Image (spheres, helix red, strand yellow):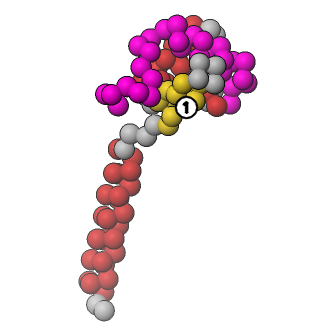
């Protein structure tokens, strides 16, 4: 195998990996979160994060804290607030 051929293969491999990583970074990821207090599911995506940040700001919570690390009573406080605010679009929203 010549040095030029090896360089070309390395370059193509690097380009392929970069393209794959770029595709992964562009995907929209979300998870379904079960709300045990209202017995429904919410799609935790960018829209829900906006609501979570709004709740955190209004109630003087740390908006950078991950929802899953909140104590159960604070999670319940969020879900109560969430059901009283916003669009009420849950997992059954046909647009998602």
Q: Quadrant of the C terminus?
A: top left
90 left or right of 67 in image: left
Which SS class for mark 1?
strand
Residue drawn at x 64%, y 10% is 60
Q: Is residue 37 visible?
A: yes
Residue drawn at x 53%, y 12% is 83
> How far across and down, in percent of the image, does residue 68 sit?
64, 31
Taking the magenta stretch, the answer to whether it contains residue 56 is no
Residue drawn at x 72%, y 18% is 73
- Residues rendered magenta in the picture: 69-96
> How far across and down, in percent of the image, does residue 84 sit?
52, 7
In the rendered view, tell whether residue 72 sits above or below residue 55: below
Q: In the depicted view, which residue is nearer to us: 29 or 7?
A: 29
Q: How many marks?
A: 1
> How far across and down, in percent of the image, does residue 74 sit?
69, 18
**Would you identify the image quadrant in which residue 28 lies?**
top left
In the rendered view, tell whether residue 71 sits above or below residue 60: below
**Would you identify the image quadrant in which residue 34 lies?**
top right
Residue marked by disc 1: 33
Q: In the depicted view, which residue is nearer to us: 8 or 36?
A: 36
Q: Is residue 57 visible?
A: no
């Amino acid at each position: 195998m010549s040095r030029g051929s090896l360089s070309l293969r390395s370059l193509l491999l690097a380009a392929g990996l970069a393209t794959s990583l770029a595709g992964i970074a562009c995907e929209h990821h979300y998870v379904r979160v079960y709300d045990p207090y209202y017995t429904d599911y919410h799609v935790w995506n960018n829209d829900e994060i906006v609501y979570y940040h709004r709740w955190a700001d209004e109630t003087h919570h740390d908006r950078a804290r991950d929802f899953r690390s909140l104590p159960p009573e604070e999670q319940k406080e969020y879900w109560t607030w969430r059901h009283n605010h916003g669009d009420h679009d849950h997992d059954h929203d046909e647009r998602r």
